[in-house]
Image: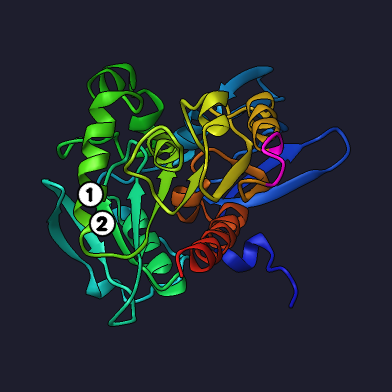
Amino acid sequence: MSTPSPSQLSAAPGVDYRRTTGHEATVSTLRAPSVNFDYCVDNHVLIADEGKIRPTVAVVAEALPSAPRTADDFVPRHLPDTNSHDGQEITLGGLPAYFAPSPSSTNSPALIFITDVFGWALPSTRLLAHFYAHHADADVFIPDFFSGEHAPYAFDEFAVWDAAPFLEKYPPRGDVARTKIAAVVNDLRGKYWKVGSMGICWGAPGTLWLGSGANETKADAVAVAHPSITETRDYEALTKPVLLLTAGYDVYFPTEQRRAAEGALLAKNETVWSQLALFLNTEHGFTTRGSDLGGYAALAQIDAAQTGSAFFKHWLH
């Protein structure tokens, strides 16, 4: 089976999204009018005609004639829809949560999504939960850890959003987040024989904590996608199987930090199963927002979802 080209993945005219390594360029298509740039690294691009270095998201936002404003505008176009009509909003561990049921009626494990700053209601995240529910054969839950708040969905608004007040109110590390996470896991432990956790960006520190020997409320397997605000000691403390889904260009999890995490896991000398999937030519957020961008990022999103689902299918069954 041949790899589809960006034009096959996205019918809409789009941006030439060029990332060069000095030898070759990879091009993917974004849903925006044509704009070209020559070099991308750590979520910044060099625009040759202007001689400026700009954040990628700002360049994309300026190219969009009318940026999406609501969650409904972010329903993925490329991620397969697997029983998304079966989802429902429930209460879990005292928090609102979205529930995507497994297609199996009995004996399914539970999988928690600890989301990025876009929160529990982003349609692409909910559809991703159904993908995992179907392919990992698990009941998937997305708790609301932000009391209904979230980062702006629109690209142009997010480009100028100040995350500091949000992160001060909802810190991903420490007792505040861990208390909420533990309540969710404890609620599930009374109903499920195994529990896994997927931490996306903001959710990575809490997920790694669930996979460590630092607490009694452990998950049976953990995965993180383009993790943020993690430290080497988080990986050193792991005692449960772990999967890292990482982006080729990620200012929040740069190469040196990724290699430090790899070193911490290698030092365990095969006592803890660890797996790292590096998706070259992708950027931070591709596992949930890849469908919004289209092209190469959308293909990477699907592949990451398949990788993550296979990991949890193996370790939770």
The correct choice, above or below, for 29 with respect to 236 in the image is below
Question: Hey, which residue is sitting farthest right in the picture?
Answer: 23
Which label is found at residue 21?
A: none
- Residue type, numbered disc 2: Arg
Q: Nearer the viewer, residue 58 or 149?
A: 149
Quadrant (top left/top right/bottom left/bottom right) for the N terminus: bottom right
The x and y percentages for residue 249 are: 64, 34
Give the residue number, with chain letter if any, for mark 2.
189
Q: Quick check: is 18 in the magenta stretch?
A: no
Residue ID at (62%, 51%): 273
Q: Nearer the viewer, residue 100 or 34?
A: 100
What residue span does the magenta drawing correspond to? Answer: 266-270
The x and y percentages for residue 207 are: 41, 41
The x and y percentages for residue 310 are: 55, 66
Q: Secondary structure at mark 1?
A: helix
Q: Quadrant of residue 51?
A: top right
Which label is found at residue 186?
A: 1
Colouring? rainbow
Q: Could you classify mark 2 by the number of other residues whose Cα lies within 10 Å: few (under 14), some (14-19), or many (20 or more)?
A: some
The x and y percentages for residue 33 are: 52, 46
Residue ID at (38%, 33%): 156
- Residue type, numbered disc 1: Asn
